[in-house]
Image (tube, rainbow, N blue to C red):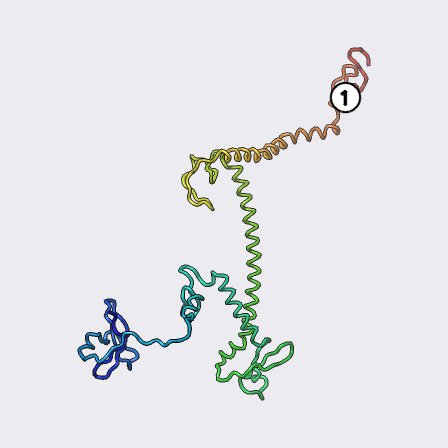
Amino acid sequence: MSAPLVVNTRDGVCWTRRTVTRGGVALYAPESVKTCPNFVMATLAELAEHGIAGSTVVLPVPVGPGSQESPVEDDRAKAPWGRGEDGRPLLPMGAHWTDVPELVDRTVSGIQARLDQAQSGHWYDASVTETWRAPGTVRTNVDGYQRTVGQFTNMLPGDLDLVLHAHDDLSWCLDMIARLRVRVGEVERKYAFDTAVLRRERDRIRERVSEPFGCTHCGQAQRSHGRQYLSGVGMHAWERPTDAQVKDRMLARRAARMPLAADGITRRIAPVQALRDDEPEMGELEEWCTGCHTDHAPNECGYRPEAGDA
């Protein structure tokens, strides 16, 4: 049986149950005492020594309309992990509210809505320049038109300065957030493009250096593999490639070697080709003529050795 919630002793004091110890012992304190330390509270046995005139186990509950969702349940639906001291919803362990874009967008939208509801323009203390106005009169200047915002009295100079600059500061912060979001989008798109380029280069290099019978994940030979880390795969040991991988790697290596071989052949035949291109500009080699006993090009003097005359 559970301990009663309210106990009335014979001396006319009403005792209410405040807490329960780890051992299941209920502790009571007088109803007129709002705060009471645990070590001075009385147990039900101690109250029985003074004499119990009556007790209440369950407090009456007023009958209302149909069952409705309590505010606690409604708040639990909005903040399933509870709320912090500042009233913000708590997130699971290891997460921060800034990591959830929805919460950030909601917070920024709330700030923007409050800023839109306030009067726009540059706020200033009109009582400083217009001495006939009441102290603390704040006005705003919108496109050359002045309008009174209100009168702030009994405020310290620092607090008034904060209020006057709050509109401009919030506008600047929201504009900076919008610009930073655009910049982040550009960086993300550039990063995605650079990542795709790097991935293609990595695949191209991997096709050139991968062993046909290397690891199925990284393409490295078994003799020098061991346990390695690869992005997307993690730590892995050497694994035999499939027949299709071996075939594709051999074809890829052959295709990768063809441009290199063509470049090597071009470099080797370039000097010979240059000589052939310069051949029309070079004269014929001179020879010793036995007819005129001079050096000249062949057939220049018309002497034929078989004829014996010039």
**Observer-nearest of 91 and 227:** 91
Q: How many marks?
A: 1
**x and y, in percent, of residue 153 in the image:** 50, 84
**x and y, in percent, of residue 293 in the image:** 77, 16
- Which residue ends up furthest to the left in the rendered image? 49
**Observer-nearest of 108 and 41:** 41
Dot 1: few (<14), some (14–19), or many (≥20) neighbours within 10 Å?
Answer: some
Give the secondary structure at mark 1: loop
Q: Quadrant of the N terminus?
A: bottom left
Q: In the rendered image, which residue does mark 1 sit on?
A: 297
Q: Residue at x 66, y 28 (%)?
A: 272
Q: Quadrant of the C terminus?
A: top right
137 to 101, vertically: above or below: below
The amino acid marked with disc number 1 is: Ala
In the visual, does 183 lie left or right of 50?
right
304 to 225, vertically: above or below: above
Quarter of the rendering containing residue 131: bottom right
Quarter of the rendering containing residue 39: bottom left
**x and y, in percent, of residue 248 in the image:** 53, 35
Q: Residue at x 47, y 40 (%)?
A: 218
**x and y, in percent, of residue 59 in the image:** 31, 76
Q: Residue at x 81, y 12 (%)?
A: 309
Q: Residue at x 57, y 78 (%)?
A: 123
Quarter of the rendering containing residue 89: bottom left
